Amino acid sequence: MTAANAAGGEGPRHSRRSGGLKVSQPDFGRRVHLRRRELGLSQRQLADGVVTPSYISLLESGVRIPTLDVIVHLARVLDVPVEELTGLPVEELTGRSSPPAPAGEKLDRSLLITRALTRSALDATDFAEARALFERTYRDARRSGDHERAVEIGLDLHGVLLAQRDHLERTALLRELLELTPARESTELCVILLTDLASAERDAGRLGEARDAARGAVDRIAGTALEGTAEHARLLGVLISVLSELGRLEEVEPRVEELLSIADRLARPSVLGRSHWVVSIVSAQLGRHEEAREHLVVARRHLASSEIPLHDWVHFCRSAAHVLMDAGADLAEVREWLESADRTARLLNLPGEESKMAALKARYARRAGDLEEAARLYTEALGEDSAVTGLDLVNIKIDYAETLRLLGRGHEAAALLRDTADLCEKNGAYQVAVRVWRQIDRLHSELA
């Protein structure tokens, strides 16, 4: 795990670029000044820890030219579009005085700026801005008939949708991309898109569709450049998780052996770590708790030595806590993982993280015997501002219903499970819905 070093001096503290853009000063500075005064913000409030107040003063006076990072930050805080703040369309943020370029070159420049702006927005966890930028560029590429560019931008857009946990939009986008010419002509690209689709369908709770997409990718990967690669391992990890959720345990074992074999041959910490992570979860679901703990130890060792993104580390810590609770581990050991996940999650501003942490704390409280606290935390996890969706939402509701049952609130538990089953059916997650209805039947038998 690494963290970016802060840049000193008056410049932006996390900017990756130096040098200014061809933004017109002092006009830009006047726009910033007027909008800041309109909102009643101080220069310190506008700086917001990203730049210094004195840097804002230099911008407003027209002395400094901003970088892309700073432009995106200011537009976000001032709540105005980037184009309105700069007085330029996105594609003209650089090279305004350059001679006219061929159409293809202009498109490349536009893509470069879009990606730079989007990286800045993602650094500021402004996913709405990043999504809007990529969606516009993607639509433009589709309208112009440039399918190569559409796929390229579509994959970038998919990454933003994944960060937003918008699984239904992910599946719709990926199905669009699979229909475009590049995916039909490249088996490797088709495999990559089908793997992403399987992951999206799984996260949306549509396990049948996820299984079909993953199997479609497995059927195509043999003999391609992706066979035996990290992408192959990723595909197997998705397929294993889906088969496990579906209860197709007889199909899981050979896939686990294949996954670990590929990971061992590659001998890359990130692949080994993620592979053993998947196997730890599946082993716990199979009731093989000692194996689950062993794989967890291996996963931690490898992931700690790789540059795993923070949001993945949070996910891993949460998974570890769940695996250990399944295995009946000491609560002090579980709490270590829970606190690690909580500390890292606070550094991020990702949709659903607070709700998922509340759900994990609720399960911990239930395991500790504090059912009332568990119920309170589950209520918090499912609050009106909860950003949890798909299978995560379903699993949290199922856990909450079990807590209500243990509290003797069986009728409330049954109502919650019925709501969960309806949610599954609405999203096409019929296999999960069947599982929930069986729980409802068992609960009704207890209440009878």
Image (tube, rainbow, N blue to C red):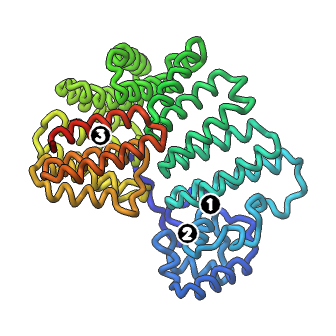
Q: Secondary structure at mark 1?
A: loop
Foreground: disc 3 or disc 2: 3
Q: Secondary structure at mark 2?
A: loop
The residue depicted at 36 percent of the width and 33 percent of the height is 434
Q: CA distance from mark 3 to mark 2?
A: 39 Å
* Residue 12, quarter of the rendered image: bottom right
Sequence-wise, the earlier of marks 2 and 1 is: 2
The residue depicted at 75 percent of the width and 30 percent of the height is 181
The location of residue 190, given as percent across then percent down, is 63, 26
Say above or below: 271 vs 96.
above
The location of residue 347, given as percent across then percent down, is 37, 58
For disc 2, the marked residue is 11
For disc 3, the marked residue is 319
Mark 2 residue crowding within 10 angstroms, few (<14) / some (14–19) / many (20+): some
Where the N terminus falls, by quadrant?
top left
- Looking at this view, is 211 or 337 the one in front? 211
Q: CA distance from mark 2 to mark 1?
A: 9 Å
Answer left or right for 321 relative to 434: left
Q: Amino acid at mark 3?
A: Ser
For disc 1, the marked residue is 18
Q: Please say if the residues under marks 3 and 2 sit with CB atoms less than 8 Å apart.
A: no
- Looking at this view, is 117 or 408 the one in front? 408
Q: Amino acid at mark 2?
A: Gly
Sequence-wise, the earlier of marks 1 and 3 is: 1
Q: Secondary structure at mark 3?
A: helix
The residue depicted at 33 percent of the width and 57 percent of the height is 382
The location of residue 367, given as percent across then percent down, is 13, 46
Q: Amino acid at mark 1?
A: Ser
